[in-house]
Image (cartoon, rainbow, N blue to C red):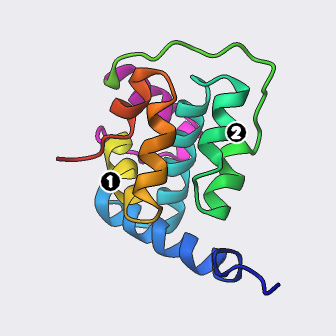
Amino acid sequence: MPIPMEYQHASEDFMRFLADARDEAGLGTMNQSFTMVDGVLRTFRRRLSPLDAIRFAGVLPPVLRAMFVAAWEPEAAPLPFADRAEMTREVQGLRQHHNFAPEGAIADVATALRRHLDQTAFDRVLAGLPPEAAAFWAGKA
């Protein structure tokens, strides 16, 4: 069997996603975009059970899937979903001295992410997660 295309082009696809997220958020560099995306993924992951986190990771593109599970502490109890402002502060708290995530970081990442994955599969997984999960990933209108 040949190597699936999603793996053959994982790095290029990831860089296109980071550029898209950077532009969506109005950031200046890919490094800033990376930190913002990492913060959003970690903030969301902290609110899922290990089983739900694995289900969610399964619909992400390969490099984002790896980021989503990196530095994970699956034994930690899930946090409750909070309001958008509180979760945004959590995103901005990751590497805070090098974090330029704007107030709309979660929606910016969600909007970019939806352009880089199978939206039908993504929505199907979100439907099986806590109700707040779909709101988290709603993106911009």
Mark number for residue 54? 2
Q: Nearer the viewer, residue 33 or 81?
A: 81
Name the residue at 54% across, 31% down.
43
Q: Can residue 92 be spotted in the picture?
A: no
Q: Which residue is mark 1?
A: 111
Q: Is residue 95 magenta?
A: yes
Question: Which region of the structure is painted magenta?
Answer: 85-104
In primary-sequence order, the first of circles 2 and 1 is 2
> What residue type is disc 1 on?
Thr
On the image, the x and y values in percent for residue 114 come to 38, 57
Mark 1 is surrounded, within 10 Å at the Cα level, by few (under 14), some (14 to 19) or many (20 or more) other residues, namely many
Look at the picture and state if 101 lies above or below 62.
Answer: above
- Identify the main secondary structure in magenta: helix
> What residue type is disc 2 on?
Ile
Q: Quadrant of residue 28?
A: bottom left
Left or right of residue 27, residue 4 in this image: right
Q: Quadrant of residue 11?
A: bottom right
